[in-house]
Image (spheres, helix red, strand yellow):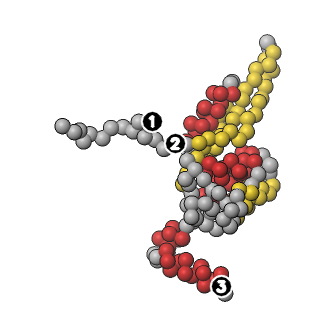
Amino acid sequence: MARDIKRPRDRDDAPEFADRLVAINRVSKTVKGGKRFGFAALVVVGDQKGRVGFGKGKAREVSEAIRKATEQARHRMIRVPLREARTVHHDIEGRHGAGKVVIRTAAQGTGIIAGGPMRAVFEMLGVQDVVAKSLGSPNPYNMIRATFDGLQRQCSPRMVAARRGKKAAEIQAQAKVTVEA
């Protein structure tokens, strides 16, 4: 007799995530007996199919800081619509504090042209072709937050059509007419 009881998801059923350590920072506090070190880690996690998240963790040991950051990144994941599962739908700008990034679509075969922390985000997201430039702050925390700000504003034609009460084909037809004119 087969059971139809729904069981909680096992770890094996969960989608597989890849993670990338972006930055690690060591800080020291001088105390009576000498120096006490602490570590801060910045990690990007993604399924390479359109979901990505970032997290930061602080601890006395590097491994514990990375574990905390990875856990936080998995809880703060966002879904980003991708065109043909390889690039973004349209050019976008993202801002956070003094950090500003410009993310542009790219033709097939271009690859990921982005520096440091942004490259990690795109690789974990599963983007294959994109051109990105960081303007302003070189701080990896601000760069990643600015990149996420831009990615959250990314809209697919289907999302725009739903917002306007039209069909996706109508929106794409209007876009082609605008480009040709």
* Secondary structure under the numbered disc 3 in the rendered image: helix
Q: Quadrant of the N terminus?
A: top left
Identify whether 177 is placed above or below 102. below
* Secondary structure under the numbered disc 2 in the rendered image: loop
Residue at coordinates 55% horizontally, 53% vertically from top-left? 49
Q: Amino acid at mark 2?
A: Glu
Q: Amino acid at mark 1?
A: Arg
Residue at coordinates 72% horizontally, 47% vertically from top-left? 117
**Residue with the mark numbered 3:** 180
Q: Amino acid at mark 3?
A: Glu
Cα gap from disc 1 to disc 2, whole angstroms? 9 Å
**Residue with the mark numbered 2:** 16
**Residue with the mark numbered 1:** 11
* Image coords of residue 148 (percent x, y): 64, 53
Q: Nearer the viewer, residue 149 or 106?
A: 106
Q: Is residue 177 left or right of residue 170?
A: right
